Amino acid sequence: MEFKLERIHDKVECFEAYDIKTLEKKIEEQIENNKVLMLEVHSVTHHVCFSPDSGRPLYTAIVHFKAKP
């Protein structure tokens, strides 16, 4: 049996929540988790729209993590 270990260089994650505080908390938790993998935030894109199901605002974010040099 052979094990191959490769380093992750890029990782993109999506987050959503019905309030901005919860969204920020989810992103902060994942930033801490990705520090173990030696990844840091490269860019963040965020949007807000109204959820057709609940009629409330739905906050979304796409976070691009890149390997630390």
Image: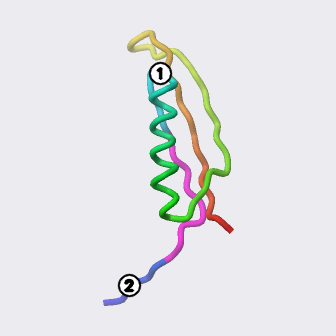
Residue at left offset 36%, top offset 89%: 2
Residue at left offset 69%, top offset 68%: 69
Residue at left offset 61%, top offset 56%: 40
Label 2 secondary element: loop
Residue segment shown in magenta:
6-14
Is residue 58 found left or right of 64 in the rendered image?
Answer: left
Query: What's under tag 1, amino acid-wise?
Result: Asp
If the image is split into quadrants, where does the N terminus sit?
bottom left
In the image, which disc is placed on residue 3?
Answer: 2
Disc 1 target residue: 19
Query: What's under tag 2, amino acid-wise?
Result: Phe
Q: Give the colour scheme of this rendering.
A: rainbow
Is residue 42 found left or right of 14 in the rendered image?
Answer: right
Which residue, as the protein is rendered here, is positioned at the far bottom?
A: 1
In the image, which disc is placed on residue 11?
Answer: none
| Residue 45, x across and y down, in percent | 64, 37
| Residue 38, x across and y down, in percent | 55, 64
Residue at left offset 67%, top offset 46%: 43
Which one is in front in this view, the residue at disc 2 or the one at disc 1?
1
Mark sitting earlier along the chain (2/1): 2
Label 2 to label 1: alpha-carbon separation:
42 Å
Which residue, as the protein is rendered here, is positioned at the far left?
A: 1
Is residue 44 found left or right of 17 in the rendered image?
Answer: right
